[in-house]
Image (cartoon, helix red, strand yellow):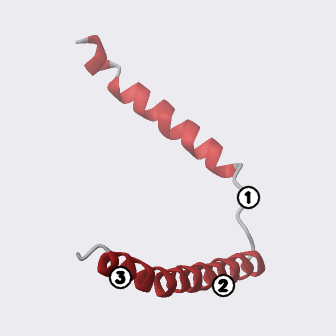
Amino acid sequence: MAAITQWWPNTRTFVREVTAEAKKVTWPDRKTVVGTTIVVIVATFIIGFYLYACDVVLVPAVNWVYKLFGA
């Protein structure tokens, strides 16, 4: 029963602490967000192209191994 009676004070303390911590957060400006977004998009394309190139090279190699062993 004690846990039920402590629910509201614990909740108020939690919300008060979350609010205090949220005030300490430094949010990035628009220039930083745009810059990091561009980096993520470019990195995604580079990794995608690399995986495509690996697929183009490895599919014929795997097919050759299958034909070699009669599968």
The three-letter amino acid code for the residue at tag 2 is Val
Query: Is the residue marked by circle 2 packed among few (<14), some (14-19), or many (20+) residues within 10 Å?
Result: few
Report the quarter where the N terminus lies: top left
**Vertical order, 17 against 34 (above or below):** above
> Could you say whether the residue bearing mark 3 is in a helix, strand or loop?
helix
Q: Nearer the viewer, mark 2 or mark 3?
A: 3
The residue pinned by badge 2 equals 42
Q: Is residue 20 left or right of residue 32?
A: left
- Characterize the local packing of mark 1: few (<14), some (14-19) or many (20 or more) Cα atoms within 10 angstroms: few
* Residue type at tag 1: Thr
Image coordinates for residue 22, horizontal then vertical, percent? 62, 50
- Determine the CA span between mark 1 and mark 2: 26 Å
Mark 3 or mark 1, whichever is nearer to me = 3
| Quadrant of the image occupied by residue 66 | bottom left
Q: Which labelled disc corresponds to residue 26?
A: 1
Q: On the picture, is 16 further left or further right than 2?
A: right
Q: Earlier in the sequence, mark 1 or mark 2?
A: 1
The label shown at residue 10 is none
- In this rendering, the answer to whether 22 lies above or below 41 is above
Q: Secondary structure at mark 2?
A: helix
Earlier in the chain: of badge 2 and badge 3, it is 2
Q: Which residue is mark 3?
A: 63
**If the image is split into quadrants, where does the C terminus sit?**
bottom left
Question: How many angstroms separate mark 2 from mark 3 (CA)?
Answer: 32 Å
Asked whether the residues under the numbered discs 3 and 1 touch, taking CB atoms below 8 Å apart as contact, a structural biologist would say no
Chain-order first, disc 3 or disc 1: 1
Residue at 63% across / 42% down in the picture? 20
